């Protein structure tokens, strides 16, 4: 699947690089990545592009441009999402978000549900259950993250490090600096806990919604999916559980994840 990268500038003056895939006459889908950023290989986008015209932007602070200071809080992230929709010229797109991206997608749908044709929340962050506290990913090393995020931790390490040779000092430095910037930006809405009162706003979401969750998710177990479904009172949200996957289901089971999202097409 061919991938193009374009740069758009929002009305606020923030530049964003956007990966685009799929036929232009397919229905548009905006895909919001999680706290790990857009990795060099995103297999779920290949599968989504079979049914959608996919637009996958990088969040400020996740690319080479030093834009992390341009967004500070949950409202900034949410409005930036809608600014990207405008800058890309998308009319009532489908919206999908993974983890942190799912949290932002849910906020976008709460603010402007009529602006979306469908919503897919993939292991979305944003809620907090006292009986099931979310582990602190900001205190974990890469190998510890893999244990929490993946059903197959060994394969997960390779995904997280993108095959990095830790014996290469320069490559290791670039990885650590880049990772610190990403987590610093993500921490604005996820640290110390991913609770920005989204639960009080989900009643506003009227967009057709599918919740897609890894069966083995240790970071946000499926009880969080059930809680999302309870709070989405204005739409009959469908829950799809993906076997053989944990929190990073777009990487472990990309075909099944994309198929669940494509269910929004009817």
Image: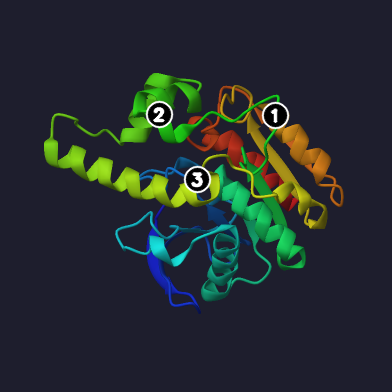
Tell me residue 254's x, y (percent): 53, 36
Q: Which mark is residue 130?
A: 1
Task: First in sequence, mark 1 or 2: give its number.
Answer: 1
Which residue has dot 2 on it?
A: 140
Task: For marks 2 and 3, give the CA distance.
Answer: 16 Å
* SS class, disc 1: loop
Question: Residue at coordinates 67% horizontally, 25% vertically from top-left?
Answer: 132
Residue reaching furthest to the front: 192
How many labels sit on residues? 3
- Crowding at mark 1 (Cα within 10 Å: few <14, some 14-19, many 20+): few
Q: Which mark is residue 244?
A: none
Question: Residue at coordinates 85% horizontally, 45% vertically from top-left?
Answer: 236
Marks 1/2 in contact by CB < 8 Å: the verdict is no
Q: Quadrant of residue 145?
A: top left
Tell me residue 27's x, y (percent): 63, 62
Tell me residue 40's x, y (percent): 34, 46
11 vs 216, nearest the viewer? 11
Marks 1/3 in contact by CB < 8 Å: the verdict is no
* SS class, disc 2: loop
Tell me residue 4's x, y (percent): 38, 61
Task: First in sequence, mark 2 or 3: give its number.
Answer: 3
């Amino acid at each position: 699947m061919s991938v193009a990268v374009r740069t758009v500038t929002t009305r606020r003056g923030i530049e964003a690089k956007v990966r685009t895939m799929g036929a232009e006459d397919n229905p548009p889908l905006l895909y919001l990545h999680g706290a790990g950023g857009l990795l060099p290989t995103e297999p779920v986008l290949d599968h989504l592009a079979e049914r959608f015209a996919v637009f996958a932007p990088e969040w400020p602070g996740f690319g080479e441009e030093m834009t992390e200071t341009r967004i500070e809080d949950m409202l900034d992230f949410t409005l930036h999402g809608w600014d990207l929709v405008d800058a890309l010229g998308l009319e009532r797109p489908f919206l999908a978000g993974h983890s942190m991206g799912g949290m932002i997608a849910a906020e976008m749908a709460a603010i402007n549900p009529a602006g979306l044709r469908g919503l897919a929340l993939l292991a979305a962050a944003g809620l907090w259950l006292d009986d099931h506290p979310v582990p602190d990913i900001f205190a974990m090393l890469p190998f510890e993250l893999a244990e929490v995020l993946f059903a197959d931790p060994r394969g997960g390490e390779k995904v997280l490090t993108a095959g990095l040779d830790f014996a290469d000092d320069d490559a290791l430095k670039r990885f650590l600096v880049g990772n610190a910037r990403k987590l610093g930006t993500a921490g604005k809405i996820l640290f110390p806990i991913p609770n920005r009162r989204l639960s009080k706003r989900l009643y506003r979401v009227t967009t057709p919604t599918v919740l897609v969750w890894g069966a083995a998710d240790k970071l946000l177990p499926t009880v969080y999916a059930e809680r999302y479904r309870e709070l989405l009172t204005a739409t009959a949200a469908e829950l799809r559980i993906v076997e053989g996957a944990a929190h990073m289901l777009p990487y472990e089971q990309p075909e099944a994840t994309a198929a669940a999202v494509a269910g929004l097409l009817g």
